[in-house]
Image (tube, rainbow, N blue to C red):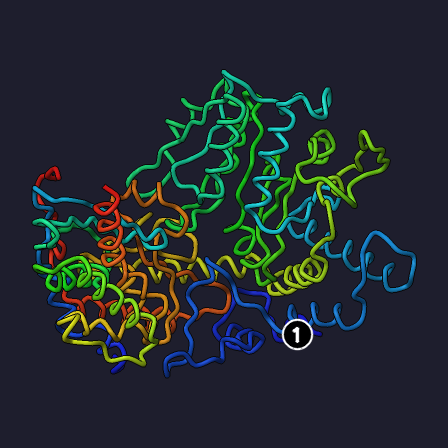
Amino acid sequence: MSSSLESLYQEVIMDHSRTPHNHGLREGGSAESHQLNPTCGDEVTLRIHSQGDTITSLSWEGHGCAISQASASLLSDVIVDLDRAAVQERIDAFRELMRSKGTLEGDEELLGDAVVLGGVSRYIARVKCAMLAWVALEDAMAKTSAA
Amino acid sequence: MTVPDASTLSDGPLTLAEVERLRADFPILGETVNGHPLSYLDSGATAQRPTHVLEAEHDYLTRRNSAVHRGAHTLAAEATEVFENARARVAAFVGVRENEIVWTSNATEGINLVAYAFSNASLGRGAPASSRFALGEGDEIVTTEMEHHANLIPWQELAARTGATLRVIPIDDDGQLQMAAAEEIIGSRTRVLAFTHVSNVTGVINPVERLVALAHAVGALVVLDACQSAPHRPLDLGALGVDFAVFSGHKMLGPTGVGVLYGRAELLDAMPPFLTGGSMITTVTLEKAEYLPAPQRFEAGTQRVSQAIALGAAVDYLSEVGMQRIHDWEAALGQRLVSGLSAIPGITVLGPPPGVERAGLASFVVEGVHAHDVGQYLDDLGIAVRVGHHCAQPLHRRFGVTASTRASAYLYNTPAEVDAFLEGVREVTAFFGVVPTLYPQSSERTSL
C-alpha cells in the first residue's frame, strides 16, 4: 500500500466510517435533504436540528463508501451550536479544500477533524463522495431559508 | 499495418506465450500506473486497442479521408470503398449480409433506433409495410431483470409512448434467467422480446436459441444485446435467428463512437427511419421525402467513417486470433476469477458459482467495504477494475446491493494478472477490516 493511499484512508476516517457519529435520524428536525451519487449509489439523508437561528446539531443516515460516510460523520461533529453564517463558512471552506487538488492543508479552526479529508482532494473521482453530506447540509439550509 | 503475424499463432488453444506476444500489440498495456505495471481488468467497460486498429484509423485519415457516398473525386470513391468494405467485414464477422448492418454511434443508439422506428410505425409512419412494428394497448414488450439500462429504458419509453405494457422476466439467485417464468410471460400479446446475450455483471450466458424459439412461436420480434458476446465468443447472428442485434466498437478492440445494429434485411427495409436528414433519401420536396433502402435509410448525416474502418480492422484482428480460442482463454480466466474470489472470506460473487459457465468476468461484493473503496485500493496497485452499478441498477437491487466491483478480462489478460488481482482483494479485506455490519442501519425512520 502506498503512502498516498494511507493519506486517503487515515485512521480517523476509518474510525468514523466504522463507528459513525450522529448516525440515525433523530426526531424534531427543522429541515432534511437526501443526496445521491448516481455513479456509485452513495446516499446520505441529513437532518438539521435547530433552535431559533442556531443549528444545534445534525443527524443523518446513509450508506456508501468509507469516504462518504466518514465525511458525514465528521461534518456532524463540526456543526454544533453554530449560526447559519458560521455553518456556511465551514461548508465553503470544506468545498475549497476539496477543490484544492492537494494544495491546501485545511483550516482546523473551522473544520476540526474534517481536515483529515484533505487527502481526498488529490483523487478527483472521490471528491463527490466527500462532498455528499456537505451538499446535503447546504440543501437543507436552503429549505429552511425558503420556508 | 499488420494483424497478428499468422506464423506466431498456433492452431490449438491460446497459450500464455501467444498471449504475451499479443500483449505487445497493445501499447497501453506497457503503461505504469501508481508505480505498478498496469493490470487492465476493465475491458467489460471498454477494451484496449491494438496498434493494428490505431494504424488503420491513422492510415485512413492520412491517406484517404474524404466524404463517403458523395463526391466523384478519387479520394471520395476510395473512402466509400474502404468504408463499405469495413461494413462487409463486420457483417461476415457476425454471420450476416452487409446490407443488414447499420452503423450507429454505439449500442445504446442501436436499441433506441429500433425503439423509435417502432414508435414511428405506431404513429402510422411507413405504413402499410411498417404496420407489423406498430404497438398499442394490449401489446407487450418483454425484457429481463438482468439488462443494462440501455436495454431497459428505451423499452420503458416505447411502452409509455404507445400504451404497450413492459414485462420483465425475473432471474434466480445465481443470476440465471428463470426460463419457466419466460415461458409464462412470452405469449400471444408479446410483440418484442429484448434481452442480453451475456450479462456484463454476472457473466451469465442466456439461452438465445430457446428464447428466440419462444418469441417466434408467438410472432414476436427478438432484439439481442450482443455487446458482451460479439467481442468475446464466436457469434453467428444469422444462425441464432434473432431479428435485431446491437454491439459496440469500443468493447471489441475498436474505437468509441461507432456501434452496429443488425436487422434482418426484410425488417430493416420495412421499418420507418429514426434519424432523418441528409444521406438517407432519394427524392426530397418541400413537403415530403422518399427514403433509401437499408442500411442507408438509417444512416442520416455524416457518418463516423474512420471509426467504422477501424472497427473493420478490429474484427480482422479478432478473427486472426480466432474467436473460439479467445472465448476459451477468457472462460478459463473467468473460472479462475470466480474460484479465487469465492475462496476469500467476506466476498460474495454475483452470478453463477464456480464450475458453472460464465463469461470472463466476475462482479463481487466485499462485506462491509464499499465497491468504491475496493476499487481505490486495487487502483493503488495498478489494477483497473469497474466499481458501481455497471449501468444495471435493477440487477444490483435484485441482489440487495447498490454497487459491486467487477473484474473483466479480455484476450490480453493473463492468469498472473488474475492472481495479482485476487491477492489485492485479499489485502482489501485486511486493510478495511471486514466486520459484519460496518454501517449500522438506524432503526425505524423517524419523522421530522
Q: Is B69 left, or right, of A47 in this rendering?
A: right
In which quadrant of the rendered view does residue B447 lie? top left
Q: How many marks?
A: 1
* Residue placed under numbered mark 1 in the picture: B5
Q: Is B406 positioned to the left or the right of B51 in the image?
A: left
The x, y position of residue B11, in whole percent, is 59, 66
Write down the quadrant of residue A132 in the picture.
bottom left
Tell me which residue sits at (48%, 42%) in the image: B196
Q: How crowded is mark 1: few (under 14 residues within 10 Å), some or many (20 or more)?
A: few
Residue B386 falls left or right of residue B58: left
Q: What element carries label 1?
A: loop
Along the viewing direction, whichever of B336 and A90 lies nearer the viewer: A90
Q: Nearer the viewer, residue A77 or B10?
A: A77
Between B341 and A70, the one lying in front of the other is A70
The image shows residue B84 at horizontal and vertical percentages of: 78, 53
Residue at 37% across, 80% down: B34
Q: Which residue is drawn at 58% across and 45% down?
A: B109
Q: Quadrant of the N terminus of chain B?
A: bottom right
Q: In which quarter of the image is the C terminus of chain B?
A: top left
Compared to residue B333, the image places residue A136 above or below, namely above
| Relative image position of residue B72 (x, y in whole percent) | 92, 57
Answer left or right for B236 relative to B58. Answer: left
Disc 1 is attached to a residue of which chain? Answer: B
Residue B343 visible to an observer of this rendering: no
Residue B126, above or below B97: above
User: Can I make out residue A140 in this image?
Assistant: yes
- In the image, B238 versus B390, the foreground residue is B390
Percent position of residue B2, x then y: 69, 73
> Which amino acid, by three-letter code, is at mark 1?
Asp
